[in-house]
Amino acid sequence: MSSSAIRMQTAAAAPEARGCALALAGIGHSFGGTIALDAIDLTVAPGELIALLGPSGCGKTTLLQIIAGFLQPSRGSVAFDGLRVDHTPANRRRIGMVFQNYALFPHLTVAENVAYGLRARQAPRAMIQSRVAEMLARVQMTAFGARFPRQLSGGQQQRVALARALAIDPVLVLLDEPFSALDKNLRLDMQIEIKSLLKSCGVTSIIVTHDQEEALSMADRIVVLNKGRIEQIDTPDALYDAPASLFVNGFIGHANFLEGRTTDPRGHVALAAGGTLALPQAGQRPAGTEITVSIRPENLTLSAGDAPGAIPTTIRVVMPLGAVSVIECVMASGESVKVSQSRAAWSGQPGVPAWLGITDITKVHVFDAPAGSPSITRP
């Protein structure tokens, strides 16, 4: 059936969905009495690359299955190009899928795998041959058309899986943990290659991952999911620099969390671990408010001598990581923090004293302390 015929079976979506390649409105899903997704709203622009990011069990795979048509949502609507597809079967949604294990047919050659979706749609033979040749050229696999999947490396199989997904000229490409089977050195190269290919094709894409670095490097925007709800939708830079919640701050990148409380309306904070900080961003809270202060390792610095406002610590572990070292320091309270510095900037060894400072106070984040966090003994 043609795509135009498919569209005739769909209903018009809400006005806000028009002009969007994908629009999810009020999506909810439950498995028995367990809520997997709750009130998911998302619009995706044509050609945009979106990452669904979150820990295991957050609902990202369930959401991907609903978009693909493998699962019917308990509530809400799904629209492609302004038309609802809630009841359109998966095989009629013109979606290209790239699975975690690639899911190539072992008995078919590379060229036959790429042609599979076109043959299933009864495309003309000449069109199939032309499209397969085009896709193999795009993924740099022209010379491998007659080979079988077992004769390919993991990276080559992934290219074939992507070529197969793109061959049908999809309205949307869905990628489910596509890099998890690759070794670390190959993973970054493939991320760069696939992002470049998806962008050059202009296809709207959704990638599901639990790997924050993968999401940060690939996506135009990231949807951070937690316990079936959206915590934040934003660009990679905005998520990292301006997290909307304590969860996002801890899930994106690395962070040190210090409990404290405000001592006056000007933003002075007494830390539970000892010492005080002047944080203008804490000044909007009444004195005595318990807060969590978040500082990323790269926004801390160590010095061998005391300095105004510096916190005395002792070096516990030094971990060289190529150009930088991650240094774990222990404060007098016994609480530890991690500092990331260039190897040239710090040569101290475990056991030596060091003074901890903040390089840029504007990059410190302040959140209301979660329920059950340790309280500070009040004077």
Image (cartoon, rainbow, N blue to C red):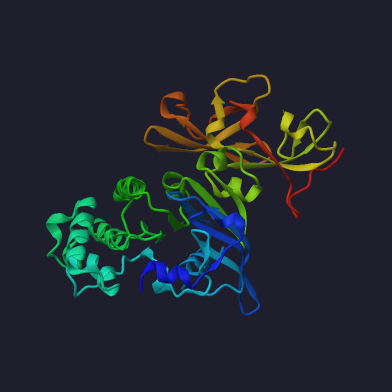
Residue at the extreme right: 379
Residue at the extreme bottom: 32
Name the side, left or right, on which 87 lies relative to 147: right
As displayed, is residue 5 above or below residue 46?
below
Please state, as top left, top right, bottom left or bottom right, where the C terminus lies in the image.
top right
Q: Quadrant location of residue 335?
A: top right
Nearest the camera: 203 or 53? 203
As displayed, is residue 11 above or below residue 162?
below
Name the side, left or right, on which 268 lies relative to 308: right
Residue drawn where x is 52% and y is 68% of the image: 62
Q: Is residue 312 visible?
A: no
* Residue 18 percent location from the top left of the image: 55, 55
Name the side, left or right, on which 327 lies relative to 74: left
* Residue 305 percent location from the top left of the image: 58, 20
* Residue 56 percent location from the top left of the image: 52, 63
Nearest the camera: 112 or 277? 112
* Residue 122 percent location from the top left of the image: 26, 73
Q: Is residue 4 visible?
A: yes
